[in-house]
Image: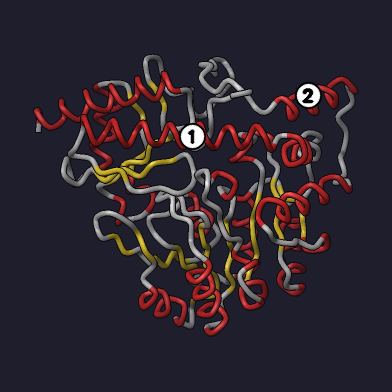
Amino acid sequence: MKYDFDLPVSRGNTLSMKWDVGEGVLPMWVADMDFHCAPAIREAMSRRLENGVFGYTLIGDEWYDAYISWWQRRHHFTIERDWLMFVTGVVPAISSAVRKLTTPNENVVIQTPVYNIFFNSIINNGARVLENPLKYDGEKYEIDFEDLEIKLADPQTTLMILCNPHNPVGKIWDRETLAEIGRLAEKHHVTVISDEIHCDLCDPGCEYVPFASVNETCRNVSITCIAPTKAFNLAGLQTAAIYSANENLRHKINRAINTDEVAEPNVFAAIVPAAAFNESEDWLDELRQYLYENKQFVRRYIAENIPQIRVIDSEATYLLWLDCSKVTPDGTALKDYLAEKVGLLLSEGEEYGRNGKSFLRLNTATCRSRIEKGMDLLREGINSYMEEM
């Protein structure tokens, strides 16, 4: 490999949310990576830093061109320039959309287990969470379309947040599934916000389908949130984009993000997408292979050493969803035990919805030596937990 992802990168004394969790703890929870950013991104930031003046910043042509070119080249979908809007992050975009597109106490449908911050964006902005729980057969997840239509048909439902690809279960929704979501949304006059932040972290050989690319219906009912931040590890730079082909929705979202003051970039947020999309493609391809191998290592290790845990098949993201129901029905208690007993910090499944109660989420985006250590700690912790229980 050209890039050294095996290098253990120290993130101490950087005010890292992930790592600032106490001495002797191995954090494999919050979704950011422990790898150095691609060289082209760091070089672009260094060049800008050397200028020494960091005033109010505009979005330039290269920002638009980078997004358009990337989605055409990598995802076979043409985003038109006037569809695109800068926003400081996917979560601010979703929160602004909930405020603008719902009135108090209206429903927003989410498909649980799902990214936990969706709950915050809905509840904190005066709307109600309406869960469309994914169907789980003990091995994989699918959408319960009968239940979804009931939820979308509720007169109080005006919005749905789709996670595509899905966090935490690692599912890539296929074109037929997305088309059916679009059909039901149009039928029941519901707008779909498609969170596609993990789209560039599909396993090698796998490819996600942009919701808006499926057909005209999906384009017309949707707003899509995208960013280089997950794939290129740039979350702290506060840079993302929204696009919508629907002129009316686009106008509303543009007003929403400007009213909420999340539509203006900092000096680095304006330039790093171009460095990522235009100059770091080879870095991303090597990263995807490395992450895939990390996930495969975890699967093999757990199957051989901790057979009480089932790893849900994953096609995307660097996150793994662990079914711990044969160990305990209480994933929160297990998470706390692992952190206290062996110093391994994972995410509790119940954060992602009630149907995640017996699950844990594990982040594999770190060097292999830490993955190996984490697996040893997990084995030690599970064995100890089962002996004590």
> What amino acid type is highlighted by mark number 1?
Leu
Residue closer to the observer: 334 or 262: 334
Q: Which image quadrant: the C terminus?
A: top left
Could you tell me which secondary element the residue under label 2 belongs to? helix
| 147 up-or-down from 296: above or below | below
- Distance from Cα at disc 1 to Cα at disc 2: 24 Å
| 206 up-or-down from 130: above or below | above
Image spot of residue 242 (x, y percent): 70, 57
Q: Residue at x 48, y 31 (%)?
A: 365
Image spot of residue 90 (x, y percent): 62, 50
Q: Residue at x 41, y 47 (%)?
A: 314
Residue closer to the observer: 334 or 73: 73
Q: Residue at x 64, y 67 (%)?
A: 212
Q: Quadrant of residue 129?
A: bottom left
Could you tell me which secondary element the residue under label 1 belongs to? helix
Q: Is residue 300 left or right of residue 306?
A: right
Q: Quadrant of residue 26?
A: top left
Report crowding for label 1: few under 14, some 14 to 19, many 20 or more residues within 10 A (C-alpha). Answer: many
Q: Which residue is mark 1?
A: 291
Q: Which residue is mark 2?
A: 43
Task: From the image, state whether disc 1 or disc 2 is nearer to you.
Answer: 1
| 206 up-or-down from 384: above or below | below
> What amino acid type is highlighted by mark number 2?
Glu
- Which mark is first along the chain, 2 or 1? 2
Residue closer to the observer: 41 or 49: 41
Image spot of residue 121 (x, y percent): 53, 55
Q: Residue at x 67, y 51 (%)?
A: 74
Q: Is residue 254 left or right of residue 343?
A: right
